[in-house]
Structure formats: C-alpha cells, structure tokens
Amino acid sequence: MRTVKKLVRVVRLAYRVDMDQEPKDVRLPIMVTATEAKAIDDWRFDKRIPTRAEAIRQLIALGLRAKD
C-alpha cells in the first residue's frame, strides 16, 4: 500500500511539472454514471484535491502513465 501511495505522489509531481505548464483551453465534455461520479468524488476527497476537474485530470494522467 505504501508503494502505491508513493507512486501516486511521484506521478502527481510528474504530472504537475509536465502538464500544469500548458494552458487548459480544450474542453472535453463527458458523461459518467452516478456511480462513477461518486467514485471520482470519493477519490478526490481522499486525496484532498480541490476540484472535480483537477481530480479527473490527475486520474487521466495516472491512467496514461500506467499504460506505459
């Protein structure tokens, strides 16, 4: 479990260095189920992420990095 938390911190730092420098000017409207929204919000609150949009960006970054 500690390894996962450490990995999340590393990915979060890498994400902020790489992607936070770019303007957020592309809108991607998506629809999710109520269950998915709750899961995103639960993850967001657990990680103390201020907005749902930022949580979704971080989850996308985690998914993209996990793919590699």
Image (spheres, grey):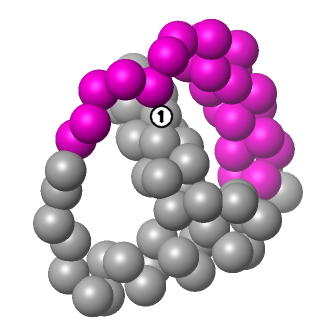
Q: Main secondary structure of the magenta part?
A: helix
Query: For residue 39, what is the image quadrant?
Result: bottom left
* Picture residue at 18% right of the left edge, 56% below the top: 30
Disc 1 marks a residue whose amino acid type is: Ala
Callout 1 secondary element: helix
- For residue 56, above or below residue 63: below
Task: Residue under label 1, please give it.
Answer: 61
Between 53 and 44, which is closer to the camera in this rendering? 53
Counting from the top left corner in percent of width and height, residue 57 is at 47, 42
- For residue 12, above or below residue 26: below
Is residue 20 in the magenta section? yes
34 sits to left or right of 63: left
* Picture residue at 72% right of the left edge, 74% below the top: 46
Counting from the top left corner in percent of width and height, residue 23 is at 50, 16
Question: Which residues are the magenta region?
Answer: 4-28
| Quarter of the image that includes the N terminus | bottom right
